[in-house]
Image (cartoon, rainbow, N blue to C red):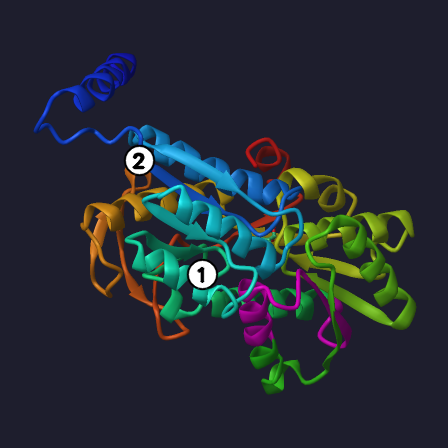
Amino acid sequence: MRKLLRKALTVVALVAPLVPGVASAASGDKYAIVFKNTGNPYGDRQMGGFKQGIEEQGFQAILRAPDQPTAEAQIQILEQLISQQVKAICIVGNDRDALQPVLTKATKKGIKVFSLDSGVNPASRLTHVNQADSEKIGQTLVQAAFDMSGGSGEIAILSATSQATNQNLWIEFMKKELAKPKFANLKLVKVAYGDDLRDKSVSEAEGLLQSFPNLKVIIAPTTVGIAAAGKVLTDKGLGGKVFLTGLGLPSEMATYIENGVCPYMFLWNPIDVGYLGSYTATALVSGKITGKVGEKFKAGKLGDYTITKAPDGGTEVLLGPPFKFDKANIADWKKVY
Ligand code: RAM
């Protein structure tokens, strides 16, 4: 049945441009996603989900990411995508505000622009595809540090870049949570930035251990950072002394969950985030949604979604709650993503 459908779609795609007056199934329409930087398995999965969703709808997916996780590098790619006349751009922002001029330029050319995973400011986007409730992520990670440390001691955050919108939002909510009386004995000693680059994240993790010999917990709200910290703590034999938690990719973290360095961590399915982005893109292009609160659309196999208000005053599409990974389930999940 699936094969037949695919065959039928291919025939339509080949024939449609030749038949005057028939709106083509638009198989040539290009939909682009721009991730933060290359070399991040999380990003590959997220872009993979976007590609899958775009292609199953009969369109062409363009997956791009710069070598370095900077706004400047993304601007170059965005200029190229404008020239290529893509239908929509799904941006995973390396900066909240710096992309606004180029994204506004894209919008003026008729391209539907929205963010995903790491947002851009509301003025630069139609909506944002959010992987999980940002405030809950902050609260959950602080609670984890509280439980792992026994309720008191020094903790540090190992983040991505200092400009990353998603990490900055989660850190903001972590700090809000830490300000509550319950967490008065937890002391946040430093926020370090590994820039979502493996080597830099390793050296930043080492730096934290050196500067803070009494450190009890490292929270890394980035898959690159948490995997780097997992390796450092394992190599130094610090399992059980310095605990690790955060947001990690099960396939990269299984070793450190199994050896006890990271008792547990959280994440969502990055493939689903990208897939939801692909249906958000086509719904915006077809006019089914415009990015306003209350609008509804169907995201293929994921089902129905409604646009809601985002914490930054713009709108968002929320994938769902994050998932906890620990010794009991990591063996199953490490094969999935
Ligand atoms: C890294 C990236 C990504 C973030 C995850 C948790 O892979 O920074 O944007 O969502 O971690």
Describe the element under mark 1 as helix, strand or loop.
helix
Q: Residue at x 31, y 30 (%)?
A: 28
Please give the residue where the numbered disc 2 appears in the rendered image.
29
Q: Position of residue 208 (x, y in %)?
A: 84, 67
Label 2 to label 1, Cα distance in Å? Answer: 21 Å
Quarter occupied by residue 192:
bottom right
Looking at the rendered structure, the secondary structure element under dot 2 is: loop
Does the stretch in magenta take in 153? yes
Q: Which residue is at 61% across, 69% downward? A: 143
Residue 199: mark: none
Residue 46 higher or lower than 99, as above or below: above
Q: What residue does disc 1 label?
A: 102
Mark earlier in primary sequence (2, 1): 2
Q: From the viewer's perspective, is the residue at label 2 or at label 1 nearer?
A: 1
User: Which quadrant holds the C terminus?
Assistant: top right
User: In the rendered image of this protein, does residue 225 appear above or below residue 209?
Assistant: above
Please name the residue shown 62% across and 35% down the image: 334
- x, y percentage for residue 19? 12, 21
Residues in magenta, as a range = 149-174
Query: Quick check: 281 left or right of 330?
Result: left
Residue type at numbered disc 2: Asp
Q: Is residue 157 left or right of residue 58?
A: right
Instruction: State whether residue 183 appears in this view.
Output: yes
Can residue 213 be spotted in the picture?
no
Q: Amino acid at mark 1?
A: Val
